Amino acid sequence: MSAVLEVTDIKKNFGGISAVDGVSFDVREGEILGLIGPNGCGKSTLFNCILGQLTPSGGEVKLDGKLVTGLRPAELNKLGVSRTFQLLQVFPKLSVRENLILAGQEHQGNMASRLVGRSDAGLTDAADQMIGFFKLDHLADEPAGGLSYGQQKLLDAAMAFMGGPRLVLLDEPAGGVNPSMLADLKERLVAINREKNATFVVIEHNMEFVMSLCSRVMVMAEGKVLAMGRPDEVRKNPAVIEAYLGH
Amino acid sequence: MSGFAKPLKIALGLAAIAALIIVPMNFNRYGLFILSQWAVMSIAAMGLNLTLGYAGQVSLAQGAFVGIGAYAAAIMTTHGWPLPAAILVAIALSFAVGWVLGYPALRVQHHYLAFVTLAFSTLAFLVFRNESWLTGGIYGISNIPRPHILGFATNKPLPFYYVCLGSLAVVSLAVWWLIRSPWGRAFMALRENPLRAQSLGIDTRRYTLMAFAIGSALGGVAGALYAPLTQYIDPVPFNLSLSLDLLMMVIVGGAGFYFGPFLGAMIAVLLPEWLRFTEGYYLMLYAAAVMVLLIWSPTGILGILDRYLAERRTKAASALHAVAKSRLETAQ
């Protein structure tokens, strides 16, 4: 399996604090990589560095072997890297369908065709398929702000998949989602991973969710990689146990 | 506005258009001037509504773009160029300048951006006033001709009013198309959540610059009509207070609502006329009315309507819900 994403020695300093301190790893084609670690260990900062939302203080990011460090988030998204956010980031006034059309429209045509072409950029069918896939059918025309928290989380995830991404970075997709909806979410993620051959990196605190979803898990602590391996290996790693359970 | 049935909306729209065409036929010179001014200011306010209301970029420079358009039209038409050519130049010029003015918006937001655009507004005013070789300085440019459209002279107030109204119609259609296109959606995403927009592949830089450029270009169109409307321009009407007036039109009408600028411009242009009987007090009354409105509804007049319709929808939905629930209970 080839690496979709290669991260080499990424560093990010905020003043004197190094939030990410030389992290290297790769993500293999088609895998679901879990990323865990205590709060404040640099997981989200690492995501933001990979995605161009923050400029890393050092190191490089390669997508399919091509250097992409320093590209802007919109450019990375066009190259097939998409994300979800830790906190809800849907557009509350737009309907569920409109949110999904918005999420896909920049992947259709060019600026000119988006101005003179169809209002929905030809995405209504694709949006409705996604709505069906995430079982949000009865909510398609509702403003996204009126959905329950869990439903908005599903929509947020669905939006990340609209452009047909190769690599999706999910930041705590399970946070605040009730157990029955969580099972749904996991099932959807696994299905997209298999059917669409999308590769995922998932930040998550819900251990059961991570361990059952991911093929490999990376553990971070204090801005560094503490361990990397299969879920059962990581779970038994003494360093991980210490980082999580304290001294 | 989705609360109204579609046929009713179409009927209302046609009635409004018919009224705007037929009713002014009996108006005197002054009434036609006021109504033409409304059409011109609606165009400028629509541009600002695009920049501010839809894309969320504060601008205190829309008046300067009206000035740029007005001077472009005045200079060209007094040198024998036809007005349509002058309008095209006004569009190109204010689009280009608006694009450049968009660059600060990539770095600063909200009131900081307001200050940058305010400084630009002052700069433009100084150019209009001081570069007399081009603009006539404080003496301005007079005898600005009104155009011949397809052989018809529009010197008289009524034909020229129709020129303004026709231009407003064309601009309205173009803006309507723009805001329902993917661009409109991207502008709104820019306003609501630029971070999320970026992660969805929306090139926020390009759309921000476009929002400024297109909004400013409409300011230019308004200016290019303003010059032949008044037939005389000097720098004073294009100072900062015009930018503030246009901002108020957008906010009072309802920023981010399609019909906001029409309504806002109507209030800003007509209300002072209606309040004229109060003589010295009219500006005070007008100011007080605006304050009360914004305290009551920060989203402007259309914000009130929007809230009312949303409430009605919620009530209708909960009534349906109650009916369904009671049916379920009786069935058990």
Image (spheres, rainbow, N blue to C red):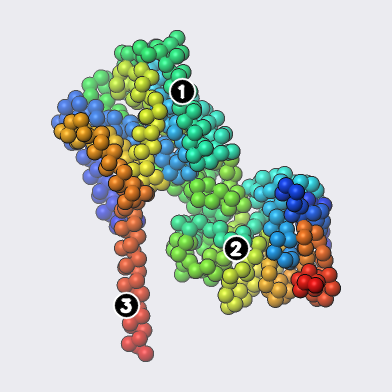
Q: CA distance from mark 3 to mark 1?
A: 62 Å
Nearest to the eye among marks 3 and 1: give it: 1
Name the amino acid, label 2: Ala
Q: In front: B140, or B3?
A: B140
Q: Earlier in the sequence, mark 3 or mark 1?
A: 1
Q: Quadrant for residue B90, please give it.
A: top left
What element does badge 2 sit on? helix
How crowded is the residue under tag 1: few (<14 C-alpha within 10 Å), some, or many (20+)? many
Residue located beneath label 1 in the image: B124
Disc 1 secondary structure class: helix
Mark 2 sits on what residue? A157
Judging by the rendered image, the residue that carries numbered circle 3 is B323
Q: Decide which of A33, B296 is in the foreground and name it.
A: B296
Q: Is residue B270 above or below residue A136?
A: above
Query: On the image, which quarter does residue A150 sit in?
Result: bottom right
Percent across and percent down for residue A195 are 68, 67
